[in-house]
Amino acid sequence: MPTIDPSVAAIRRFNRFHTRWVGALSGSLHGSGFALTEARVLYELAQRDGWLAGELARDLGLDPAYLSRILKRFTTEGWLERTRSQADGRALSLRLTPAGRAVFGPLDDASRGQAAAVLARLGPAEQVRLVAALGSAQALLSGERPVAPVIRDHQPGDIGWVISAHGRLYAQEYGWDIGFEGFVAEIAGQFLQRFQPGKERCLIAELDGAPVGSAFVVRESDEVAKLRLVIVETRAQGFGLGKALVAQAIGFAREAGYERMVLWTNDILHAARAIYMAQGFRLIAEERHHSFGQDLVGQNWELDLRG
């Protein structure tokens, strides 16, 4: 038996799950009497009038002869009207009749109900994960460019993600132990407990409805702000989010009236250090330390905000 690539096997496994889950194997989607392909054609016809058979076949990736048989059945049942297209006299324009829309209604309701039932079994955080995963899968499989991320202020639930993301990513990329997650949890907890609106801010980058990046501005003194917990998920790299998060944090600190911004990092975080240097931070001190299960070189950086 030939060896199967695990990634190929994973895609095939999901395809088998999905076809069973949507009822593609039964020959009657949601008990409607429509096969999956017929239901999809009916759905597209319900979205707008004026489809041409050729463009519908192209957009759905259907054999024109197979689509023609489906459209013939719909016409015979009284669900579809075909009239000569005004734009192309050689083609027929397609439009569902009131009877066709009446047939589509229960099918659409059943599909919505199935999706709602899935979401009802999940908690809010799981729903966000599912929607984000589906969006990512669609973008990757279709080759479409994902929707550009946005940067917003933190909301309930975001701080928990910040702690989890730091613990997970630093363990994966640098081998740091769970002590680092505890360190981040302490910083994040203090931020929530002592939060000073107008003087402090947590910026969250969001992609496909899920958080993928963060940067905190924390009050150190009346004159000094501290930049903390800058992170970007691996899947969101390539959008310039790290640079954007740091730039927005600096802009906020200036508007809040701080004179200087400081930060602490480690020399192995090369991408982050490049961003800080590009934004004008200068290295003022460094020292060796053993933390999070690793021998590290900590660095203090400073930026004059009065320039």
Image (cartoon, rainbow, N blue to C red):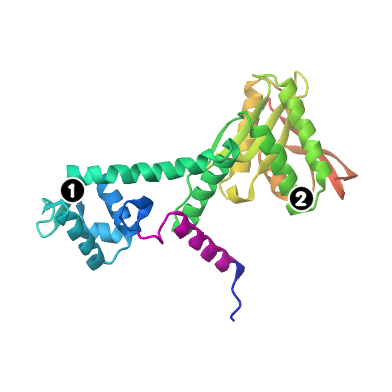
Q: What residue is at 46 percent from the left and 51 percent from the top?
A: 145
Kindly report the secondary structure that dominates the magenta region of the rendered protein. Answer: helix
What's the mark number on residue 95?
Answer: 1
Camera-side residue: 68 or 206? 68
Q: Could you tell me how many numbered marks the image carries?
A: 2
* Quarter of the image where one finds residue 41: bottom left
- The residue carrying mark 2 is 171
Q: What residue is at 25 percent from the left and 66 percent from the top?
A: 66
As displayed, is residue 84 above or below residue 189?
Answer: below
Which residue lies most toward the bottom here?
1
Picture coordinates of residue 293 (x, y %)? 87, 49
Whether residue 240 appears in this view of the structure is yes
- Which three-letter amino acid code belongs to the residue tagged 1? Arg
Task: Tell me the crowding category of disc 2: few under 14, some 14 to 19, or many 20 or more residues within 10 angstroms, Cα based.
Answer: some
Q: Is residue 96 magenta?
A: no
* Quarter of the image where one finds residue 127: top right
Camera-side residue: 103 or 244? 103
Q: Which residues make up the magenta segment?
A: 7-27
Whether residue 301 appears in this view of the structure is no
Q: Secondary structure at mark 1?
A: strand
Picture coordinates of residue 211 (x, y %)? 60, 39
Q: What residue is at 75 percent from the left and 18 percent from the top?
A: 222
Q: Secondary structure at mark 2?
A: helix
